[in-house]
């Protein structure tokens, strides 16, 4: 949101500034009738991305405990790679999850932006643009066959506990190319650029064209130079964001987004040729099959195009695997009713799957679709109910009575695994804080983080609904952009429903 001039502030602008101050300073969480305030949670989920920004921060930066960082990123490769997002509580820019974050933020706006208030939609678009601007820089040499996919030595970074404003670890640049294939990260980056192009198609046509041109070029890299990026780029990427699912899912995902963005049927022919038919019960930064199938099912359910019916069937198979009472369910639930997919950062999988539930519920409502998981009848209403239960659990309807979103609710995580949040801001402590000093003075501290990272959603509780609120327990206490991005769409969907 724009910074107000010092004189003659507009009434609308004043409302926006007051709204930001409110988000940063209070934690109201329920409406007068006791229901969750999804609009408040939505605004906070979007605000979180400002705390993850890298690069030179704009004058309207509302998260003021952050400052400029990574201003020389890309110099090692003679390219400008400033900007973008830090994926979680570290100071590395990993292109694979950043691209997925941008795709899911874009899909949230495209699918559910109509349910957002105007200022919320503008803030969500700003979050998309921050990621898309960086991805354009990463794709600057795509026509020549190179895509930049990361900045920072992850091993060195993880041996330090320091603010992004202080980081002094190597800012190594990683890229995929003909000699170092990376169809997975290139396919995801193409998806992100194509999705973002549609977000800005009406508001900024020139920018949208740039994004789409870059998406086409990057998809060319994905198709021509096939391989898993974590096998080729070095820097021990495999220890952080290895492409466990391979790259066929990203070829399907990127083609699906380019088909929607361009209407070019060559992408349909290509995605049909992939034979990406594996059954899945998870959707994440790594495995895109379920997301691609739901996206493609839209063409059957909303547009009536029967050529996509196979993807509709596969999308419904995925949904059946999530249903707690389905004979074909492969999903564990905690005693409190939360999907449990992983012992590591489980809420990322909950948020992504829930986004697909809300989105498919929307498609089903439009088409009046009902289907069966063997004997279990599935309707748009039943999908909404399951999605709402997952979101409500995250917001505090759980055995601990704890919201897993920072600064939402009466009780929320105080010691999140996040360097910038757990160390004093530059304004509060201008002196440099060294790599090991950060561990000794702050990481091991039992106190609450000094900077409240409003909207951050942590990894969440274990399979027994337990959460220790321990900064050192990164698998449960670290927030990530790719958890918040799909949650933005879920919250927009529910906020819109609650207003009707």
Image (cartoon, helix red, strand yellow):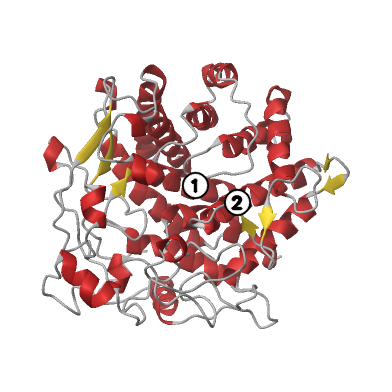
Give me the disc on residue 411: none
The residue carrying mark 1 is 104
Which quadrant is the C terminus positioned in? bottom right
Return the x and y of residue 423 as percentages of the image width and height.
Answer: 26, 73
Above or below, comparing residue 189 to residue 142 in the picture: below
Q: Position of residue 477 (x, y in %)?
A: 44, 66
Contact flag, marks 1 and 2 (Cβ < 8 Å): yes
- SS for callout 2: helix
Q: Position of residue 251 (x, y in %)?
A: 48, 27
- How far is disc 1 from disc 2 in space, using C-alphas? 9 Å
Residue 472 falls in which quadrant of the image?
bottom left
Sequence order check, earlier mark of 1 and 2: 1
Residue depicted at 29% across the width and 33% down the height: 139
Residue 113 visible (yes or no): no
Q: Is residue 65 left or right of residue 13?
A: left
> Circle 2 sits on which residue?
355
Please name the residue shown 28% across and 22% down the image.
145
Name the foreground residue: 493 vs 201.
Answer: 493
């Amino acid at each position: 949101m724009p910074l107000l001039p010092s004189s003659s502030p507009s009434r609308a602008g004043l409302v926006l500034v007051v709204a930001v101050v409110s988000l940063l300073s209070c934690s109201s969480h329920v409406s007068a009738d006791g229901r969750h305030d999804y609009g408040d949670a939505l605004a906070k989920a979007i605000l979180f991305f400002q705390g993850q920004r890298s690069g030179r921060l704009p004058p309207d930066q509302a998260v003021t405990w952050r400052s400029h960082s990574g201003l020389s990123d890309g110099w090692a490769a003679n390219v400008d790679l400033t900007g973008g997002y830090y994926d979680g509580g570290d100071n590395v820019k990993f292109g694979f999850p950043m691209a997925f974050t941008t795709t899911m933020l874009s899909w949230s706006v495209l699918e559910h932006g109509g349910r957002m208030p105007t200022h919320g939609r503008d803030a969500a678009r700003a979050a998309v643009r921050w990621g898309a601007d960086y991805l354009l820089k990463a794709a600057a040499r795509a026509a020549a066959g190179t895509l930049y996919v990361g900045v920072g030595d992850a091993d060195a970074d993880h041996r330090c506990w320091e603010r992004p404003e202080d980081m002094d670890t190597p800012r190594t640049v990683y890229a995929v190319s003909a000699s170092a294939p990376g169809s997975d990260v290139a396919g995801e980056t193409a998806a992100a650029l194509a999705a973002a192009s549609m977000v800005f198609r009406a508001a900024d046509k020139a920018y949208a064209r740039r994004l789409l041109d870059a998406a086409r070029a990057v998809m060319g890299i994905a198709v021509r130079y096939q391989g898993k990026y974590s096998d080729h780029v070095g820097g021990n990427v495999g220890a952080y964001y290895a492409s466990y699912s391979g790259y066929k899912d990203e070829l399907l995902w990127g083609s699906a987004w380019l088909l929607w963005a361009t209407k070019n049927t060559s992408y349909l022919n290509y995605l049909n040729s992939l034979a990406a038919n594996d059954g899945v019960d998870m959707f994440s930064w790594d495995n895109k099959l379920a997301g691609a199938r739901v996206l493609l099912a839209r063409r059957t359910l909303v547009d009536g195009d029967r050529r996509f019916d196979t993807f509709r069937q596969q999308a419904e198979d995925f949904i059946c695997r999530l249903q707690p009472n389905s004979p074909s369910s492969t999903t564990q639930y905690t005693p409190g009713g939360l999907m449990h997919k992983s012992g590591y950062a489980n809420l990322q999988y909950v948020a992504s799957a829930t986004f697909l539930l809300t989105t498919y519920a929307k498609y089903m409502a439009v088409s009046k679709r009902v289907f069966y998981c063997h004997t279990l009848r599935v309707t748009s209403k039943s999908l909404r109910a399951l999605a709402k239960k997952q979101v409500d659990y995250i917001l505090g309807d759980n055995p601990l009575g704890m919201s897993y979103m920072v600064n939402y609710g009466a009780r929320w995580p105080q010691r999140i695994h996040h360097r910038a949040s757990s160390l004093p801001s530059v304004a509060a402590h201008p002196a440099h804080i060294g790599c090991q000093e950060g561990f000794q003075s702050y990481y091991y501290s039992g106190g609450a983080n000094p900077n409240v990272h409003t909207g951050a959603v942590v990894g969440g509780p274990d399979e027994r609904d337990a959460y220790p609120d321990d900064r050192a327990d990164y698998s449960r206490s670290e927030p990530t952009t790719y958890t918040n991005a799909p949650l933005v769409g879920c919250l927009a969907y529910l906020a819109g429903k609650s207003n009707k």
